[in-house]
Image (cartoon, rainbow, N blue to C red):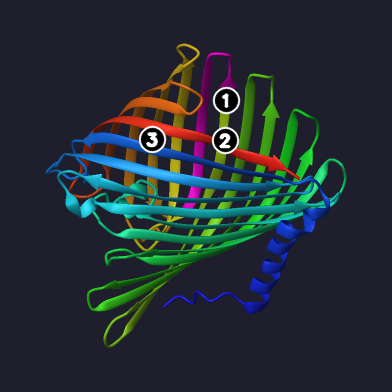
Amino acid sequence: MLNLNMNGKMLAAWRMVLAGCVFAPTAYAAEWSVKSDIKQNIAYDDNVRMRKEAQGSMFYTIMPRLAFAHKTEVSNVTAMASYGTQRYEAIEGLNQDIQAYDLNANYSTEKWAWGVVGAFDATPSRNSAVDDAGNFASTAIRTVKSISPSLSYTLFETDRITLAPSYSETSYSQSGFSNNSSRSANLSWVRQWSEAYQTSLSGFFSNYEFGRINGISQTSTTSNSYGVNFGNNYTLSERWAVNLSVGIRQVENNSLTDFIFFQETTTSTSTGFLTDSGVSYTGENFSGKLRLSRSLVPSGQGQLQEQSSIGIGLGYNLSETVRAKLDSSYQENDSTNPTQSISRKNINFAPSVSWHLSTEWVLSASYRYRQQDNNSTIGAVDSNLFMVGVNYDWQGLSFSR
């Protein structure tokens, strides 16, 4: 079992930080606002579970969301809550609710800035299968709880140091997955050389714990990763921007399998590189972005995976109210443990058109092609999805005092 209890002193300290963010700024002019939106879609997917024996279904999704904000000259607090549902016409087992809540608070002075981000999500595990375990057939609910405080200090007008620890835990409502938790700390230095050029250097350490029961055995895995990243952000012009972030990481995996009469321990080490780089263009009618990413992501399969992806996003304004978009990506997920042959490839191609009927109403139509190859006897499977959406965005209320 994972120990999910946080240190009492640490929890009390972050309560004080949050209280300072909310109540300290009362001496300043404050702005309050509340907004809401409702996203609803009706769609048909010809292979909902992404299996060789394809089964299609119509489905409907509705997701209302309510957002609050409080802002002063030195602080900003936002909170969001959403609770919706998805209903499948031919596969009742996938009829599930979706909920998400988050809080973001920060407070700053001339030299110091601190804040905290907390989140809670309970969503169908298949909705995040591309990044997680690749299982689109499960009816499990994936619950994620996370907290990410941060503390920054401005050394000079051009230099800033930030310490950002974080903690998260992920659990599943059904067997066949691995619950996991992670703890990490990132220390970064950022220099603003000019309005158009910024560099950063950061070091990180992360600890991941996985637990899983397999028949008569129980396996627990611990993965420690650490490394450094070097980043560059260029604003070439009003239309062009480039960011280049490259780093190196090392992962140490330790697995303990507890059988009935004996235990077996395995260890492994792997080294690789990390990146989050891209180039973007924003014109009057046309916009585009190319992104290349490689990162470490915990998986519901019970291991830390290296996720590599390349994505292209294009947008074009057909008129003042009609906009066309194209999002396409290729992604690979591989285990950081050399002794495991877990590997998965995903392709996504999704064009869409949106029509802004007014400032509050948006009508959209989209198509999505998805393919997954999980490097097993199943081979590659794909699906086609056709969707129409009607979204309502309430501009809300705001007032100052």
Q: Which mark is residue 277?
A: 2
Magenta-colored segment: predominant secondary structure: strand
Quarter of the image with the N terminus is bottom left
Which amino acid type is marked by label 1? Answer: Ser
As drawn, which residue projects farthest toward the bottom?
A: 261
Task: Find residue 122 and report its image quarter.
Answer: bottom left
Q: Is residue 4 left or right of residue 195?
A: left
Q: Which residues are magenta?
A: 281-296
Circle 1: element type: strand
The residue identified by callout 1 is: 280
Q: Is residue 298 left or right of residue 21?
A: left
Q: Which mark is residue 310?
A: none
Disc 3 or 2, which lies upstream in sequence?
2
Up/down of 282 relative to 83, above or below: above
Given this view, does label 1 or label 2 mark the residue nearer the observer?
1
Residue 262 location (% of width, % of height): 31, 86
Q: Does the residue at mark 1 contact the one at mark 3 (Cβ under 8 Å)?
A: no
From where the camera sits, is residue 133 visible? no
Circle 2: element type: strand
Q: Measuring 56% from the left and 40% from the top, which residue is drawn there?
A: 276
The residue identified by callout 3 is: 330
Is residue 286 one of those drawn in magenta? yes
Task: Find residue 367 and report its image quarter.
Answer: top left
Q: Does the residue at mark 3 contact the one at mark 2 (Cβ under 8 Å)?
A: no
Which amino acid type is marked by label 3? Answer: Tyr
State how far apart marks 1 and 3 are (Cα). Answer: 18 Å
State how far apart marks 3 and 2 are (Cα). Answer: 15 Å
